[in-house]
Image (cartoon, rainbow, N blue to C red):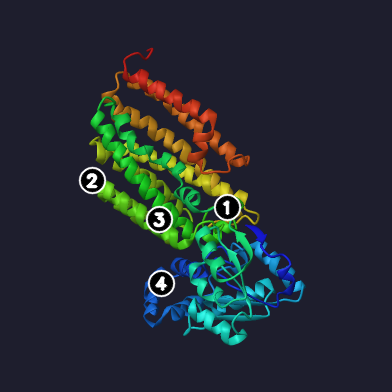
Amino acid sequence: MRAREHHPHASDALETICVDLDGTLVSSDTLFEIALAFLVAFPFRFFLCLGGLLRGRAHLKSRLAEGRLVNIETLPWNRPLIDWLETQKAKGARLLLVTAADRRIAHRVADHLGLFDEILSSDGSTNLKGGVKAAALVRRFGKDGFVYAGDAKSDLAVWRVAAAAIVVSRNKRLLRRVEKIAPILATFTPGAGGPLAAVRALRPYQWVKNVLVFVPIFVSGHWQDQAAWIHAGIAFIAFSLLASGTYIFNDLTDIESDRAHPCKKTRPFASGQLGIARGALLVVGCVGAGLLVASYQSILLPALGYLALTLCYTLFLKQKFLIDVLALAALYTVRLYAGGEATGYNVSIWLFSFSMFLFFGMALMKRVTELTMTKDGRVLRRGYDAGDIELLSISGVAAAFSSSVVLALYFKFGQGASVFDHPEGLWLIVPVVLYWQLRFWRAVKRGAMHDDPILYAFRDRPSLILLGVVLLIAIFSRLSVFPV
């Protein structure tokens, strides 16, 4: 965040500064943080807990805060504002944390920062927000008896009775409204966010995984079927929308572990660039649109299966040893099945088996990479530690060889024997695929892979060359020009 003082000399005369928490002191909203943590820890009790809304928002906050599920230390703190407040405190200012968050959260924040002289917060019956907060501060300090730091439209009621305003926002319209009711002492502009952060959260680069829906056309040999390519394209759009929705949901539930990760901590939700509420809306929008497109293409069943498996993975399976990587492999295989359903070219059991072994191995690469990148050899909310690296690596290499054996059998007994003029030429693909996988395991063991293996493949020049070799072998085998 960037800070700018509008009246630098006025700061010397400050006596009482009241500071909001959500969106001001931290870039996130602690209520949504707690709700997400509660959902992950107690998915079935979560919806029962929402019944607390009938007794008011303050009561719900109190119930959710009882679990102490949020790590206060890793929240996305507004460091420039905290530094500014420390400067004012050194000059003799009295600092108050005045927040609509529950008192348990407020006291944990105050204990962590060691900055505030007093705390005013929601208490289970009163939701200290907007006009209620303004009235409480007027009773405590009188009108114009304090400076208030806030970030949202709901804070306008407080700024109207404050001596001056500190604004944490990049919203120019809000700044203009604040200027009309209170002198602005300083502004703090949040970092990159908005539409750019939303696009990053969608992870469009992950859509490359959905090219699997085109594989049934390729292996069937009916490359000239334009209608099939169109149907596969629609399936690609459906699964891309679904994938974005599920990635956002996964990022939301993984906020705390992402903040402890050396690379993932910069993701939009973990860093506070994108609000959790907006993320929830993106999930609903992407999933809804994806299901509509899938229904139009008559692949609603595999789409729902993909969603159900992703939900189970996010809430339960990702914490289970080896079951999580099996689930990831199954998610790739569902894309193959959907491509077959959309195009009318069914996928054989051989191709399904090859897919499971291949993507099981690649999921193991991802886990080994995560374990080697963390400082303590543990990944939060995963069932692994550093002692599992050797077993995972051995299993991954075994999966690479198994996938190659199944691929050879597929070329012998699958569709290739009937649709390719020279199916024997396809056997040359087997050593290429095996070499490619073993080369990736070498990169993992040497610490050269810092990304998802699928994404690493599309950024790795030798991998692209090997892909070209595979395509050439397939084309030669299909078009009767293979040198035999």
Who comes first in sequence, dot 1 or dot 4?
A: 4
Who comes first in sequence, dot 1 or dot 3?
A: 1
Disc 2 to disc 4: CB gap under 8 Å: no
Disc 2 to disc 3: CB gap under 8 Å: no
Separation (CA) of disc 2 from disc 3 = 21 Å
Separation (CA) of disc 3 from disc 4 = 21 Å
How many numbered marks, from 0 up? Answer: 4
- Report the residue at 49% width, 68% height from top: 153
Q: Mark 4 points at which residue?
A: 46
Which residue is nearer to you in this view: 296 or 334?
Answer: 296
Disc 3 to disc 4: CB gap under 8 Å: no
Separation (CA) of disc 1 from disc 4 = 28 Å
Who comes first in sequence, dot 2 or dot 4?
A: 4
Q: Is residue 458 above or below residue 484?
A: below
Closer to the eye: label 2 or 3: 3
Q: Mark 3 points at which residue?
A: 282
Drawn side of residue 411 relative to residue 376, left or right: left
- Report the residue at 28% width, 29% height from top: 220
Please identify the quarter of the rendering in which residue 11 is found.
bottom right
Residue 181's spot in the image, x, y percent? 55, 71
Q: Which amino acid does label 2 sit on?
A: Tyr
As drawn, the residue found furthest toward the front would be 180
Q: Can residue 320 be seen in this view?
A: no
Q: Name the residue under label 1.
A: 266
- Report the residue at 58% width, 37% height from top: 442
Q: Mark 2 points at which residue?
A: 296
